[in-house]
Image (cartoon, rainbow, N blue to C red):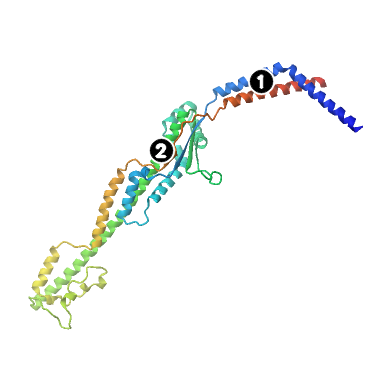
Amino acid sequence: MSNIYSQKINETDGVDLIELIRILWTKKLWIIISAFIFMAISAGYAFTAKEQWTSKSVVIAPKVANLGDYLSFRSEYASILDIKDFSQDKVSEKVFHDFKTALFSRSLKEAFFSQSAWFNTYAAKNANSEEAKQKLLSNLVDKNLIVTIPDPKKEPNSIGVNVSFAAETPKDAQNVLLDYIQFVNQWVLAENKKDFLANINLELSGLELQKNKIERDTETVRQIQLENLTTALDIAKSAGIKDYSKSLSGNVNVPEVLLGDAKVPFSDSKLRDGSYLFMLGEKYLQAQVDTLKNAPLVYPQNYYNIERQANLLNVLEKKVEKEGTVSGYYYLSEPDYPVQRDWPKRLILLIVGFVFGVVLSSLIILAREVFSNKA
């Protein structure tokens, strides 16, 4: 009994399905017309919508040739100051780290577009107010100019930083991306140059302080020497000692207490004690005083090393100020000229329009048929 009932239901379903196909077939002309109407609408959009083309690039850390003068100046700086841990790789990594950080900077992206001739022309065509211009700028920064670092887990073979820009023409996409990378490069190198010059000036200030201290200390030593000799000369004159006396009582030799050290601190210097200097005699002491007054100061070796470093840093500073072209990156893949449009996908839109027209017209026909039968 149940088998007979099921067979009837199946037969009924089969009849209904055939009936639906028959109804749609009788209305096939309307379905085809509807499909072509919607396909025409899709075509209208597909061929009038704003196009979007994306230029892509990949940048990695700069090579020695890219760093140019900047690397040689850094090497010279390390040599002058005897910096032991200097290496080319560290300089390259530091510059590229700054470059990579700057690529992600939203404020730097906005600064780039604000000074871009392309953006000013683009905004004049697409924005009729300052508020609209700002929205356009924000949209470009957020959606069109994209900077990403590949995930090592998803792309283990990828290296560097991916940079892309989407525009309405392939040429604009490529040119703007090239300009942006150059803009960031110039900004980063200008900031590095400022830091470098600041470091040089800081070192020069420190060296100047050391020189001044040595000069003051050396002058103080000479004044102490001069005072001791002048006092001894006055004593020798008063005692009537004209010539050098070779020995002193107490087994103390005069040379041991003569001029002493030229070093500081003075608490360790024999110059404090001029008790026996008068025994050198008036003639010898007078010659010493005259020589000490007229002779130029003689500084310790460290003073001249400091002076040499300062001179070399001054020369280096002038070189850095005239620094030539430097790149803080290396193109693994230069900004390409896109050959495939991102949007609109015209063929896909035409197919979608045609299918949508078929489905929608078929549903309308079937719905009308159902309601007419109920009525």
Crowding at dot 1, Cα within 10 Å, few <14 / some 14-19 / many 20+, comes out as many
- The foreground one among 247 and 129 is 247
Q: Of the residues shown, which amino acid type is indicated by label 2? A: Phe
Please tell me the numbered disc located at residue 135: none
Residue 134 location (% of width, % of height): 49, 33
Q: Secondary structure at mark 1?
A: helix
Q: Please state if 274 lies on the left or on the right of 157 as rendered.
A: left
Q: Please state if 42 lies on the left or on the right of 195 as rendered.
A: right
Q: Please state if 316 lies on the left or on the right of 259 as rendered.
A: right
Residue 263 location (% of width, % of height): 24, 68
Indicate the quadrant containing the C terminus: top left, top right, bottom left or bottom right.
top right
Indicate which label's residue lies in the foreground, 2 or 1: 1
* Dot 2 or dot 1, earlier in sequence: 1
Which of the 4 quarters of the picture holds residue 342? Answer: top right
Q: Residue tagged by mark 2?
A: 183
Indicate the quadrant containing the N terminus: top left, top right, bottom left or bottom right.
top right
- The foreground one among 342 and 208 is 342
Q: Is residue 83 above or below residue 354?
A: below
Q: Is residue 88 above or below residue 303?
A: above
Crowding at dot 2, Cα within 10 Å, few <14 / some 14-19 / many 20+, comes out as some
Residues tagged 2 and 1 counted as in contact (Cβ below 8 A): no
Taking the view exactly as shown, the residue that stands out farthest to the right is 1
Residue 357 location (% of width, % of height): 67, 22
Q: Residue tagged by mark 1?
A: 35
Residue 278 seen in render: yes
Q: Secondary structure at mark 2?
A: helix
Q: Of the residues shown, which amino acid type is indicated by label 1? A: Ala
Residue 370 seen in render: no
- The foreground one among 29 and 199 is 29
Residue 215 location (% of width, % of height): 23, 61
